[in-house]
Image (spheres, grey):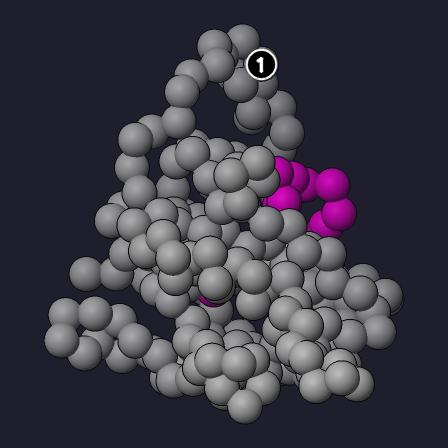
Amino acid sequence: MNLFLSLKTKPFVILSGISGTGKTKIAQWLAESVGATEDNGQFILIPVRPDWNDGSDLLGYVDIKGDFKPGPLTNVITEAENHPDKPYFVVLDEMNLARVEHYFSDVLSVMESRRWENGRIISSRLLPKETAGRDLFLPPNVYIIGTVNMDETTHPFSKKVLDRANTIEFNRIRLDHLDFLRDLPTVAPLSGGQEWFAAR
């Protein structure tokens, strides 16, 4: 419930805790509960690499021929724009293996620019036409969930990042509290869409 409410109030949530506590799985289960899966392209897992130091690995880049090569987040945004009634969930797995404010700064700035206009949430431009071939905006039906481990291999978050995210910390995990899940029958996803997650 905390994850759902966090996504409803901000499109960016950080799940923080020790390794192996099910942070990625919880995000996947939430997405699957409303029919968003990897198979239909509404749930996307993007592993963050330690060598990311700018937005090109996430958003894309212009190659030596002058052609724009979209990154994984740009592909999701394009799909989300084409299906505004469906929620799209992006998990940035171990997002602080690289410095978040380096590779994610453009997205963070655009998130801060979101505003209501004529009954819709709109944002500033994420990528210009000169780069991507068209103006690219962050649609309101894209939800980004970052999973983070805090250890010697990771980077701390800046205040800029924390200010734009809701954070859920997994400090005390009692896995035996989830024993009730073992014998539950498989059920069909709920027939809800973007209207469940959209801010009002």
Q: Which secondary structure lies at badge 1? A: loop
- Residue 76 position, x and y percent, is 53, 59
Residue 175 belongs to magenta span: no
Q: Residue at x 75, y 47 (%)?
A: 19
Kind of residue at disc 1: Arg
Question: In the rendered image, is residue 6 in sight?
Answer: no
Q: Is residue 143 above or below residue 125?
A: above
- Residue 42 position, x and y percent, is 49, 46
Q: Is residue 130 above or below residue 183?
A: below
- Residue 145 position, x and y percent, is 54, 57
Residue 75 appears left or right of 185: right
Residue 25 appears left or right of 78: right
Q: Residue at x 54, y 90 (%)?
A: 130
Q: Nearer the viewer, residue 198 or 96?
A: 198
Q: What residue would you read off at disc 1?
A: 182
Residue 15 belongs to magenta span: yes
* Image quadrant where residue 72 sits: bottom right
Image quadrant holding the C terminus, namely bottom left
Residue that protrudes farthest toward the left in the picture: 118
- Per the rendered image, the range of residues in magenta is 12-26
Q: Residue at x 48, y 69 (%)?
A: 165
